[in-house]
Image: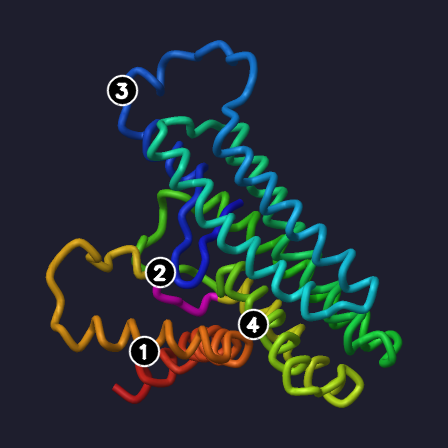
Amino acid sequence: MKEDNMPVEETEKEILKEDVDGSDSAATTQKQPHRGVYLLPNLFTTAALFSGFYSIIAAMNGNFTHASVAIFISMVLDGLDGRVARLTRTQSAFGAEYDSLADMVSFGIAPALVAFTWALAPLGKVGWIAAFIYAVGAALRLARFNTMIGSQDKRYFTGLPSPSAAAIVAGVIWASESAGVSGDQVASVMALLVPITGLLMVSNVKYRSFKDLNIKGRVPFVVLLIAVLILVLIALEPALVLAIMFCAYGVWGLLGIFIKQLR
């Protein structure tokens, strides 16, 4: 199931659900399945799947920077296929299911295996259990998201979105590699970070989806300056800035719980 990049989570299945709910005849008329599939949105999904698969291959070859970057590329492509389907009116049940399977590879299996190969393997059972907790967390997250479509507040995600979780793991690995820090040096940290991230995906912690953000309206001039500053920082230190951004997003949901309790 597609979850959109931080902080956007919009899927072909969600779009399809909205279309079905808005039609009186869809509930009573069973349509015959159409032969063939829509090419354009499924090409983006395939590209996202390829990027996730390449991430695993790169990690097996010891190129962890490329492996981490491939996960971020997969996030971008994952954020495009649903929008392309909506713009071209080519959303379908097949595309939604295909996207869900691709997400499991790109944001479930790939980050777990990259983290295991980079840092967790020397820890033995502790290492592979930590990686498995992340992988099963992503699978449960995607399954739960599929069943909750149309029944939850679109302003919030229940649990950390899987693309954001993958970005946390990949961002930390990418930033560490850029700083010359090996996986062996931070193995203990990764043994905590990876399973915690996996558990956050299946938690009840609320994360803002920013779907209610009006990007078409007018904003204060300072907002544009901040956006430009962020882009400049990403251009200067992409690994470090992206890692900080996604880690901050992951922590922000937890802070929201404490803020509510203080109120």
Q: Residue at x 59, y 43 (%)?
A: 47
Q: Which mark is residue 209?
A: 2
Which element type, helix, strand or loop, lies under badge 3?
Answer: loop
Which residue corresponds to mark 3? Answer: 24
Disc 2 or disc 3, which is closer to the eye?
Answer: 2
Disc 4 or disc 2, which is closer to the eye?
Answer: 4
Which element type, helix, strand or loop, lies under badge 4?
Answer: helix
Q: Amino acid at mark 3?
A: Asp
* Distance CA(mark 4)–CA(mark 1): 21 Å
Q: Residues within 10 Å of mark 3 (few under 14, many from 20)?
A: few
Q: Residue at x 36, y 43 (%)?
A: 150
Give how far across and how far down residue 216 sits, in percent. 17, 54
Disc 2 or disc 1, which is closer to the eye?
Answer: 1
The correct choice, above or below, for 116 with respect to 163 in the image is below
Give how far across and how far down residue 224 sits, in percent. 21, 71
Mark 2 or mark 4, which is nearer the start of the sequence? 4
Q: Amino acid at mark 2?
A: Ser
* Distance CA(mark 4)–CA(mark 3): 42 Å
* Distance CA(mark 3)–CA(mark 1): 48 Å
Please indicate whether residue 219 sits to the left or right of residue 17 in the image.
left
Which residue corresponds to mark 4? Answer: 168
Whether residues under marks 4 and 1 lie with C-beta atoms below 8 angstroms apart, the answer is no
* Distance CA(mark 4)–CA(mark 2): 17 Å
Which element type, helix, strand or loop, lies under badge 2?
Answer: loop
Q: Residue at x 61, y 59 (%)?
A: 71
Looking at the rendering, the stretch of residues picked out in magenta corresponds to 204-208
